[in-house]
Image (cartoon, helix red, strand yellow):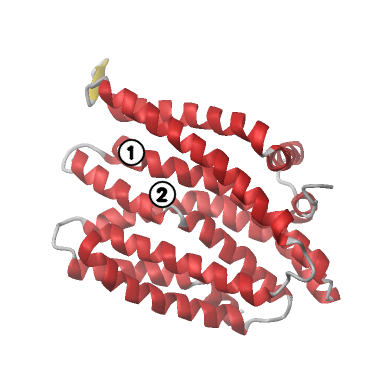
Amino acid sequence: MTPMLLGLAASQINILVDRFVAEAMVPSAGAVTQLYLGNRLMQLPLGVVGVALGTAIYPVLARAGARNDMKELGGALAAALRTASTLCLPAIFGLFALAGPIMGLLFEGGEFTRDAAESSGVCMAAYAPTLLFQTAVLLLARAEYARGNQRRPVTISLIAVAVNIVLDFVLVVPFGAAGTAAATSISTGLNAWLLARGLKLGHAVDFRRQLVLPVVRVAFCGSLMLAAVVGVRIGIEQLALPTWWNVCGIALPAANGALVGGGMIVGLAVFFACAAVFAKEELRELLALIHQRRARGAAPPNATASVLEKDPDS
């Protein structure tokens, strides 16, 4: 259990180091708060996607690992990573476009100024890729544990922490607090890449067909969504809406509310429309998983895993 905890703790260590470096080397006040808020808002989708997928797929991975069935293990892992990408990539692109308005909508007011909200939004956008990378780390590490290998995830986590420390000092000077957040994203991505290479499942599973091409298709749809949301943001900002609307004596965040609401509506519409054309199988798989969860309510892990095991081209 201890090696497993150490192997999955790299992200928390990285975030702690980020705060120490930002506090010591960023001259402007509020750097630690910006990092804290940016990271806290990332934890909700990470818990919903990463932890849920890891819990659902682990019994399948453990069963395949006990039988030394690398084809089943690799197929289940590819399906879980595929689902994670379909969920995480649109969220990441959305955060790139709307991180500042989201921060303003939630926290702006009093001493938390618009500039502070934008700075916190930049930190959240820099953390955004961690949503997919950390989910991949959770899934890939569980695949290693299912094979009975507890040392490699720990070793790779220590390498990722060391890389993060170096990048913190390299990026904090030119980019401030956002540089330390970007360092965590880069080191977490490195963690996932090293874990994937160490599994060596390419002989058992066609990852190009089952994972790489689906991720490329979803990323393409996400990039179109990003362009649409940026266009919406530019258009709404040209309207010069007031920062606050007073409705029955209650101050409502007009500009940020319009940006976030309008961006989300247009972004989701564009993404699903594009996915229906360019990523049909990935969309079908995601909708099937959502339908099963709704039908079963609190479905047991094996029920969810049965969907994740399916090949997208079957």
138 over 237 or under it: above or below: below
Query: What is the residue that sits farthest to the top in this orientation?
Result: 248
Q: Residues within 10 Å of mark 2 (few under 14, many from 20)?
A: some
Left or right relative to 207: residue 36: left
Is label 2 in a helix, a strand or a loop? helix
Left or right relative to 291: residue 225: left
Q: Nearer the viewer, residue 292 or 165?
A: 165
x, y percentage for residue 202?
73, 69
Q: Residues within 10 Å of mark 1 (few under 14, many from 20)?
A: few
68 over 303 or under it: above or below: below
- Residue at x 52%, y 62% (from the top left corner): 134
x, y percentage for residue 127?
40, 56
254 over 280 or under it: above or below: above
Question: Sequence order check: which comes first, mark 1 or mark 2?
Answer: 2
Is label 1 in a helix, a strand or a loop? helix
Q: Nearer the viewer, residue 47 or 90?
A: 90
Please say whether residue 84 is visible from this viewpoint. Answer: yes
Which amino acid, mark 2? Leu
x, y percentage for residue 143?
69, 70
Q: Are marks 1 and 2 in contact (CB under 8 Å)?
A: yes
| Quarter of the figure with residue 28 | bottom left
Query: Which residue has dot 1 on it?
Result: 106
Q: Nearer the viewer, residue 12 or 192?
A: 192
- Residue at x 28%, y 49% (from the top left corner): 120
Task: Quote the CA–CA distance across marks 1 and 2.
Answer: 10 Å
Query: Which residue has dot 2 on it?
Result: 41
Left or right relative to 10: residue 26: left
x, y percentage for residue 61?
75, 67
Which amino acid, mark 1? Leu
- Residue at x 26%, y 23% (from the top left corner): 238
